[in-house]
Amino acid sequence: MFYRWYALAAFGLSAAYLAVPPGLRWIPFLLITLAAIPAALVGTRRSTGSGRIPWFVLLVALVVYNVGNVLSVWYVYGQHRPTADGTLADLLFSVANVLVFTAAMTIIVRRGRRDVGGMADAALTSLAVGGLLWDVVLLPHLSAEGMSQPRQMALFVNIFITLGTFGALLRVAKAAPERLATIQLFSVASVATLIANVAGALASDAGGVRPDWTNVPFLVAYAALGTAAMHPSAALATRLTPAPKDDLTVGRLTFLGAMMALIPLVGGGRALFGLPTDGVLLAIGSVLVVPLVMVRIAALSAERRLAEQALRRMAAHDSLTGLPNRAACLERITTALTAPQSDGPDDTPWLAVLFCDLDGFKPVNDRLGHAAGDQLLTAVAQRLRGCVRDTDLVSRFGGDEFVIVCQATDSRAAVNAVCERIRTMVRQPITIEGQTVQIGISVGVAFAEPGSTTDGLIGRADLAMYEAKKSKSLGNLSLAAA
């Protein structure tokens, strides 16, 4: 609740700043900027672990900012200088800008690292919008005013850093399933800083003195940063969000293509008409666009690989239990039958198939419902996995039927060991929907023989399973061999 009072006071003072007599405006200015320090401290203390990093960096940035603000007040009001530009305060502001950018990027990277493509799109769009703003609005004015190259470069960097931060924050806010006020307030601070920098550049006189009204958006940025740090959602700002759906529709591709072409088109158009152009912007824009496009292509390629892997897994695995499905089981048996046999006595089978059917499953499914039946199947699947060797295959063949494939130099010994584990497992009751249920398992075993086929081996194991069912009982293993 306290953050609301802070926001009301900070934004209210910012709105009333110009109503204060010019000679006293340094008082509300410092009140707003200094109050953001304890606000950032609250955000640091509220977060835990590595979630504190962005708020700690912001806290340091605000301390550096305020040292610069105090020096600026002293230069202007104490030493009666027209501006603090070119002083130590100016250097401190540049350092603080980098720190605020670092704090914002920490949130962006941690929260949006599953949205690499979206981040690349946001950066590309910000670069294009920044280039348009610089080439069409700022550069002609700065050239006419005769601003020095170092000051132009400092403004250039600030504009692009602020726009890039805003674009990435906007993407993070849009892609996340929940809307965090902290992210939105950070975005407001970025927009306010951008407005302040642009307004300051356009409204400054020949001596570089900005009119006092350009301080208002800066104050709004301080108020927004302080409120962002104090808001309860600050502790969630660095939480990883689910990867958003990344659809490259025709409209989106057209938009991104236009953004890529914007800087060279505007720069080239101005050159054709004999207007001043910024070669540095064209060079930097061209250099940055290439890695951004490469990142975008890499993200799409990785997404495609994951989709292909998911499709392959879906084709070979049961969606409920995660076990290999019927097709994967048959393929494994076919592969084993066609592979060269391991060295061993001629009368020793090298491959065995165990056809398993649950006893007592239908009453549980009818009494507790299909959801409980699904839970029971999943639980049995997990337990069967624990009964076999790593080299054996447990598959869900269909319904409440499971097939185990054992391949060994002496598959009879392997089957005996597996069946003993299943016998022990089936004696243990299973808790489903808060109720204890007991099942049994009927198992038919078939061993491969010279000339065996996949269908023949499965058929013999299936027939043996029906023979085992004649002696079925809950809590027991009923076993028969073909």
Image (cartoon, grey):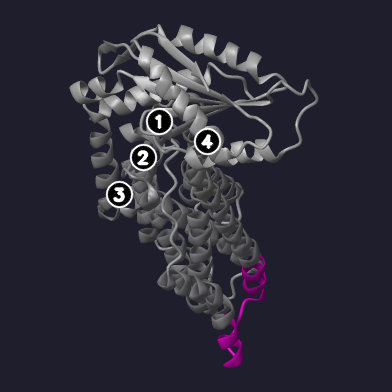
Foreground of the two, 62 or 368: 368
Image quarter in which the N terminus is found:
top left
Mark 2 vs mark 3: which is more N-terminal?
Answer: 3
Task: Give x and y (percent) for residue 125.
Answer: 49, 65
Please indicate whether residue 339 sits to the left or right of residue 32 in the image. right
Residue type at tag 2: Ala
Separation of marks 3 and 4 at Cα, in angstroms: 24 Å
Q: Which residues are magenta?
A: 267-287
Task: Give x and y (percent) for residue 388.
Answer: 57, 19
Please indicate whether residue 405 sits to the left or right of residue 254 in the image. right
Mark 1 vs mark 2: which is more N-terminal?
Answer: 1
Residue type at tag 4: Val
Foreground of the two, 316 or 336: 336
Mark 4 vs mark 2: which is more N-terminal?
Answer: 4
Q: Is residue 321 above or below residue 80?
A: above
Separation of marks 4 and 1 at Cα, in angstroms: 11 Å
Mark 3 vs mark 4: which is more N-terminal?
Answer: 3
Provide the residue designation for mark 4: 57
Provide the residue designation for mark 3: 14
Task: Give x and y (percent) for residue 40.
Answer: 42, 33
